[in-house]
């Protein structure tokens, strides 16, 4: 299950996020999204858990829970919509 984690503190680390989710089961991967230009966190990330039941339990328990003073927004990640890319028009 791919899980979206929003409202992350900008100083949160992937290890901290992994530890929070490992309380509910196995974690396959953790990725905090970083700004390309500044190298700082964008305040959200993704956690992959192989078992849907463990992922659902983590979502239910961690959504709204505080991390470094900020309430996390945790839910199942949705597929990224097409960014409106259009084919190039040729004259």
Image (cartoon, rainbow, N blue to C red):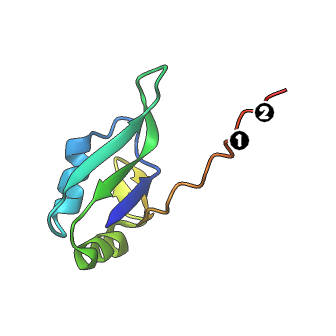
Residue at left offset 25%, top offset 79%: 53
Secondary structure category for the residue under label 2: loop
Front one among 79 and 8: 79
Left or right? Give the position of 7 relative to 24: right
Q: In which quarter of the image is the C terminus?
A: top right
| Above/below status of 84 relative to 26 | above
Secondary structure category for the residue under label 1: loop
Left or right? Give the position of 53 relative to 74: left
Tag in front: 1 or 2: 2
- Residue 7, position in %: x, y? 47, 50
Task: Mark 2: give few (<14), some (14-19) or many (20+) Cα within 10 Å.
Answer: few
Residue at left offset 23%, top offset 51%: 29
Front one among 56 and 64: 56
Q: Residue 44 carries which label?
A: none
Badge count: 2
| Above/below status of 37 relative to 20 | above
Are the residues at dot 1 and dot 2 in contact (C-beta closer than 8 Å)?
Answer: yes
Residue lying furthest front: 91
Residue lying furthest bottom: 53
The quadrant holding residue 19 is bottom left
Q: Name the residue under label 1.
A: 86
Front one among 9 and 85: 85
Left or right? Give the position of 20 relative to 7: left
Residue lying furthest right: 91
Left or right? Give the position of 5 relative to 50: right
Q: Name the residue under label 2.
A: 89
- Residue 79, position in %: x, y? 49, 60
Residue at left offset 45%, top offset 42%: 43
- Residue 20, position in %: x, y? 23, 57
């Amino acid at each position: 299950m791919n899980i979206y984690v929003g409202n992350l503190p900008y100083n949160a680390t992937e290890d901290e996020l992994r530890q929070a989710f490992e309380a509910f089961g196995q974690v396959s991967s953790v990725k905090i999204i970083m700004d390309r230009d500044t190298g700082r966190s964008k305040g959200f990330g993704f956690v992959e858990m192989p078992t849907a039941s463990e992922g659902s339990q983590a979502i239910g328990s961690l959504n709204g829970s505080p991390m470094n003073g900020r309430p996390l927004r945790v839910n199942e990640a949705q597929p990224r919509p097409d960014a409106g890319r259009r084919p190039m028009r040729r004259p």
